[in-house]
């Protein structure tokens, strides 16, 4: 247990970190839950509670099986709707048993005399998209103005990894890809996939490029060519290409790993902010059926082990609005300019 003074100092440190950052919830699609989690709850006639953007939300499936997300606190007297149940596709509040439909409209008040008209009352409702086993929610002003593409037909689901909560700001993940000069110090050591143990003598050389899509402003791509080196010598057989596509502000990112003459792996990494400095990070991956599962697990595990190397930095840094850069730093200003489209 930290002493009271240490706890107070830590709280102040976190407050200062948070104050240094721009807005925490940029416009875009965010993963709320996995579809299979929602299905499990639906089979028991229950909704699911979700913490996102410092708010409490509730997810359920309506009578047609569509995923729905409403604000969790009942417009009546504020009970938590996620403690209720789902009846014929409507969400029933546990307090006075009002029912709401998938749009959040009040559909029934059990004790209201029959001749009384149901008042127009709504629980806040959110735009929802279901893609490849993920339930996504739109955050931002107005209607969704871009889409998340589906995984190409022919690829099969090969795994999920829930990395829990990382105490970082969402923008850091986006900035990481253009910060070319951190690849050698943080990602230069080859590690055992999943375990993260360093492999002596084996290093990785990265060559990176970043560019926004010319037509679709919400898309940006980061290309990484990586090669293993043993005791300082290139191992050309190990050359690997990855294309990392941001669909929005870093909340949903598609990694495509091309393995020459074998096939392709697509990994989705998602960040869902519970609070300004608390990202729930999930990985979900798909691959051509022809790629051996072990190889898929190796490639994905390798990425995840490398991603973990950044966490200690992310969880302790502040945001520099005016960073002092030198010539060979990556296109950090260009990234920030691109990123501003998602900020109000
Ligand atoms: S608080 Fe929800 S029905 Fe009364
Ligand atoms: Fe990194």
Image (spheres, rainbow, N blue to C red):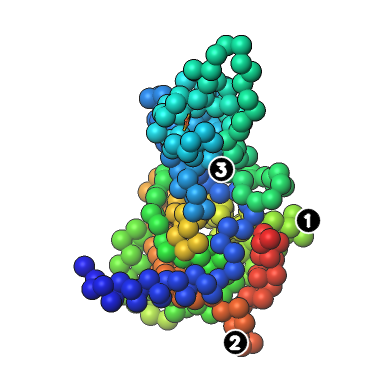
Side of 143 relative to 271 (left or right): right
Mark 2: which secondary structure?
A: loop
Q: Nearer the viewer, mark 1 or mark 3?
A: 3
Q: Is mark 1 within 8 Å of ligand 2?
A: no
Q: Earlier in the sequence, mark 1 or mark 2?
A: 1
Q: Earlier in the sequence, mark 3 or mark 2?
A: 3
State the CA–CA distance, disc 3 to disc 2. 37 Å
Q: Earlier in the sequence, mark 1 or mark 3?
A: 3
Q: Which mark is residue 324?
A: 2
Pointer 3 with pointer 2, Cβ within 8 A: no
Residue 136 image point, x, y percent: 56, 43
Side of 31 relative to 311 (left or right): right
Side of 255 relative to 85 (left or right): right
Please tell me which residue is depicted at 62% across the width and 46% down the height of the picture: 138
Residue 294 image point, x, y percent: 37, 49
User: Considering the image in quadrants, where does the N terminus appear?
Assistant: bottom left
Q: Quadrant of residue 15?
A: bottom left
Q: Is residue 282 above or below residue 236?
A: above
User: Considering the image in quadrants, where does the C terminus appear?
Assistant: bottom right
Please tell me which residue is depicted at 28% across the width and 76% down the height of the picture: 5
Q: Which mark is residue 136?
A: 3
Q: Which mark is residue 322?
A: none
Q: Nearer the viewer, mark 1 or mark 2?
A: 2
Which of the two residues, 76 or 288, is positioned nearer the viewer here? Answer: 76
According to the picture, the residue beneath numbered tag 1 turns out to be 215
Q: Quadrant of residue 232?
A: bottom left
Please tell me which residue is depicted at 61% across the width and 16% down the height of the picture: 116
State the CA–CA distance, disc 1 to disc 3. 23 Å
């Amino acid at each position: 247990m930290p002493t009271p003074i240490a706890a107070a100092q830590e709280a102040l440190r976190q407050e200062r970190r948070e104050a240094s950052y721009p807005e925490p919830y940029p416009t875009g699609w965010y993963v709320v839950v996995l579809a299979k989690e929602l299905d499990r709850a639906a089979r028991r006639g229950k909704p699911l509670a979700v913490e996102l953007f410092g708010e409490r939300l509730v997810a359920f499936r309506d009578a047609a099986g569509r995923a729905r997300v409403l604000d969790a606190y009942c417009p009546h007297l504020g009970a938590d709707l996620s403690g209720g149940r789902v009846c014929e596709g409507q969400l029933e509040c546990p307090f006075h048993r009002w029912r709401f439909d998938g749009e959040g409209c009040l559909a029934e008040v059990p004790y209201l005399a029959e001749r009384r008209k149901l008042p127009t009352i709504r629980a806040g409702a959110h735009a929802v998209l279901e893609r490849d086993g993920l339930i996504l929610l739109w955050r931002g002003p107005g209607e969704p103005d871009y889409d998340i593409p589906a995984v190409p037909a022919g690829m099969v689901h090969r795994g999920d990894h829930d990395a829990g909560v990382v105490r970082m700001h969402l923008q850091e993940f986006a900035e990481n890809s253009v910060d070319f000069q951190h690849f050698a110090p943080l990602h230069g050591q080859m590690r055992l996939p999943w375990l993260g143990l360093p492999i002596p003598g084996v290093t990785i050389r990265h060559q990176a490029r970043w560019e926004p899509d010319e037509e679709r402003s919400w898309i940006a791509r980061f290309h990484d060519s990586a090669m293993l080196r043993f005791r300082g010598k290139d191992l050309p057989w190990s050359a690997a290409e990855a294309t990392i596509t941001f669909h929005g502000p870093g909340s949903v990112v598609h990694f495509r790993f091309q393995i020459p003459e074998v096939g392709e792996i697509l990994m989705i990494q998602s960040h869902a902010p519970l609070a300004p400095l608390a990202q729930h990070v999930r990985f979900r991956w798909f691959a051509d059926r022809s790629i051996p599962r072990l190889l898929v697990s190796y490639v994905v595990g390798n990425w995840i082990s490398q991603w973990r190397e950044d966490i200690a930095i992310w969880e302790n840094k502040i945001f520099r609005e005016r960073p002092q850069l030198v010539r060979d730093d990556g296109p950090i200003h260009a990234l920030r300019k691109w990123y501003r489209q998602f900020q109000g």
